[in-house]
Amino acid sequence: MDPWLAGIWIYAALAFLTAIPLLRAIFKPVPLHPGGSSFAESLQFSDSAKARLTQHYTRMMGTLLFWKKQAEIYKLLHFYSLCWTIPSSVVIPFLVQASTSDPYSKWLVTLISAFTAALLAFHRALKVDANFKAFRYGESEFYDTYRRLLDRPDKFGLNEEAQLASYFDAVENIRKYIRNAEIDNLPTIEQVKSQLDSEHPQ
């Protein structure tokens, strides 16, 4: 087989194989691991408060699953982009120098250049690092607040009702922050197209 053609197949195969963890994160459900005792086992609250807190947590589960899944996807996409764009950017100049009249040599350079440019464009347009930080922050901040209420409820107020109200407000503020961050980080078609055009000027 032509060595340049072999290089194309090897590059494409490696790009696909290293994308498997990312594809798995996109399509596979993620479990929650809050860890430790929950509100139901707490000695700090009355039965009525435990029921309210447990119900509140069950209503948060869908949001927490979404945050965790999005954080995992953006983290893997971030590292996938880094692992391919940095080496590719270094290799491309040497491949250009080594290319011959063989059309496959030019196709290999074109493939690597186009793939690198596309990864960079989508990484910037999709604001991958900002989205990862936002969703990871939301998940982490919620569980920090959750554990703080379990361990030190006095930090939330002087009595049980005040503690629950303060906790519910804190969780609501976390949700508002992540929702605003998610909306701010949503790319438009124009942004993606502009980024791709900048990577591939006519």
Image (cartoon, rainbow, N blue to C red):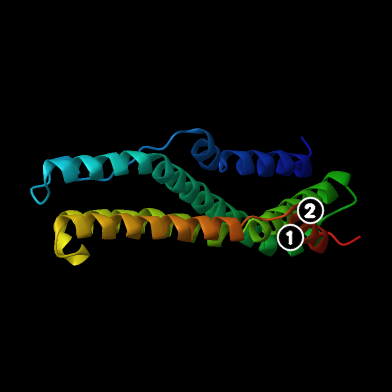
Label 1: few (<14), some (14–19) or many (≥20) C-alpha neighbours in 10 Å = some
Marks 2 and 1, how far apart at CA: 6 Å
* Label 2: few (<14), some (14–19) or many (≥20) C-alpha neighbours in 10 Å: many
Quadrant, the C terminus: bottom right
Q: Which image quadrant for residue 18?
A: top right
Q: Nearer the viewer, residue 43 or 191?
A: 43
Coordinates of residue 155 in the picture (x, y in percent): 19, 66
Q: How many numbered marks appear?
A: 2
* The one of 131 and 15 positioned closer to us in this rendering: 131
Q: Quadrant of residue 126?
A: bottom right
- Residue named by callout 1: 92
Q: Secondary structure at mark 2?
A: helix
What amino acid is at disc 1?
Answer: Ile
Residue at (77% x, 40% y) in the render:
5
Tell me residue 173's x, y (percent): 40, 60
Taking 195 as reference, is 172 left or right? left
Q: Are marks 2 and 1 in contact (CB under 8 Å)?
A: yes
Query: Residue 77's spot in the image, x, y percent?
Result: 56, 50
Q: Quadrant of the N terminus?
A: top right
The residue that disc 2 covers is 109
Outermost residue to the left: 43
Residue 78, quarter of the rendered image? bottom right
- Mark 2 and mark 1 lie on one chain; the one further toward the N terminus is 1
Callout 1: helix, strand or loop? helix
Q: Judge from the rendering whether residue 19 lies leftward or rightward of residue 161; answer left or right.
A: right
Three-letter amino acid code at the position of disc 2: Val
In the image, is residue 79 above or below residue 157? above
Q: What residue do we see at 55% from left, 55% from top?
A: 182
Q: Decide if residue 38 is in sight here.
A: no
Residue for point 78% across, 56% down: 190
